[in-house]
Image: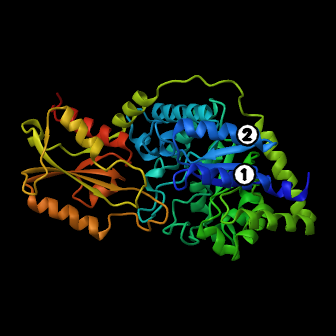
Amino acid sequence: MEARECAGRVVLEALRLDLEPEAQVRETAKSALGLGVGGFILFGGQGEQVRRLVAELRESAGHPLWIGSDLERGPGQQFGGLPTLPPPAGLAAHRRPIEAATLAGRITGRAARNLGIDLVFAPVLDLDVEPRNPIIGTRAFSADERVVAQLGRAWIDACQAEGVLACAKHFPGHGRAVADSHEEIPVVDASRAMLESDVRPFREVADRVAAIMVAHVLYPGFGASLPATMSPEIIDHVLRGDLAFEGLVITDAMNMSGFLDAQGSGGRAAVAALAAGCDLLVYPEDLRATVEALEAAARDDPAVRARLETAIRRSETARMRLSDATCREDDSHQASLKLATDSVLTIGELPGWLRSERCVRVVAIWDDREQPGRPPFGEAFNREFEAAGWTIDDSDDARFAIVLIASTPQAWKGSAGLTPRTQEAVRSVIVTSQDVLPVAFGHRRLLAELGGVGVCAWGTEPTMERAAARTILDGAGAGP
């Protein structure tokens, strides 16, 4: 194998159908294949469009490819026309959480295989222990490591039973950070004993999950002086040694500041991550520069060359767990809607006016970064109420109001709670309406900022809007 091809095999390039025209994505893919990449991470596109693209990539590659995607909230998180699921916190709030996690993993794994995706970057096994954390929150199952381990194990087993590989993240735990690794290098200044609780969910799945993603976070408690992604103290000593993990070790996205800032350039950081024990390097800031840096390092340093060869062998071993059998098609939309509805949490009593009124003001407040192509927030919620015979009153002086608040963990968002702008918008609804029911499309902690009573629907997908509306209508006996 040529040095450049060997170097490229450990890199997964990003294909952004959510941001670029398909023609441009195909040019990016062609250039990446020319550099011998080991695969791609996919964002966006419609289901059938993605299926065709993946098939063409595999046919033209000339070597096996990894096709991965972030599917923490189901296939519809990335791909249009496919079902979306509650985030892990929502699955944990389900009346039967193990069944919910199992179903979510099954739906995700089956849809991934139908698209040709073989590497699912999920589930998140971080602990939801820091309310100020701007990037984890509802992406975690729980603050309790036992619950995270139990539900993570159920999700992983169900997903991998569909013939694809799951990737637990973000080792050794991103939950205690108060900064976003997309923007900077977070430092988790916790003792080794405290960090052991963060590691526990990964320890519980180390014998079954195919891959583990390491975090761009610094952990002095483990004796590390670099982020986990490029720390042999964490990858070699803790993950490989203490946990005896034998699968693929994968970087978080390499275009994040938590990765780039550690070495001053993407190329040097990539070499450091490989040398520390990472087997797949995901989403480089500059693919060509990354491959050239790896190639040069392998040429000049026999230890780096040996690490490249080990990483490629691990990929070959991991592929033996994949299934070539055709995955049967099924309609998971109804199952995902029921799963979402059973995950919605009502805190306190629903207001009595829901039983007697059929007219309400619905105010939708978006507190997240923009999501191109997303239907207007509140549209799916309103449709459910209108189908039940309600009138949506848009006037500012309506007596009763439901305020929908979208606030979820997002990259580069920089905050965990409600922004001052959103807090003021909610206050203005409360002042102008006689009675207000808040509905949080985010963490249940958001409701504490608004008095503690309301409905928590966990995520902003239209499926969660429909689930929240049905929960309110059914709970108040106000359905059709």
Give the left or right position of residue 45, taking residue 264 as reference: left
Residue beneath label 1, please? 30
Residue beneath label 2, please? 58
Residue 160 location, quadrant: top right
Q: Nearer the viewer, residue 128 or 363?
A: 363
* Few, some or many residues within 10 Å of mark 1 (<14, 14–19, 20+): some
Instruction: Give percent across and percent down for residue 57.
Output: 70, 42
Q: Is residue 280 visible?
A: no
* Few, some or many residues within 10 Å of mark 2 (<14, 14–19, 20+): some
* SS state under label 1: helix
Q: CA distance from mark 1 to mark 2?
A: 12 Å
Who comes first in sequence, dot 1 or dot 2? 1
Disc 2 marks a residue whose amino acid type is Arg
Give the left or right position of residue 300, taking residue 285 as reference: right
Instruction: Give percent across and percent down for residue 47.
Output: 53, 37
Q: Nearer the viewer, residue 51 or 406?
A: 51
In the image, farthest residue toward the front: 23
Q: Residue at x 76, y 49 (%)?
A: 38
Q: Residue at x 87, y 53 (%)?
A: 309
Q: Nearer the viewer, residue 430 or 390?
A: 390
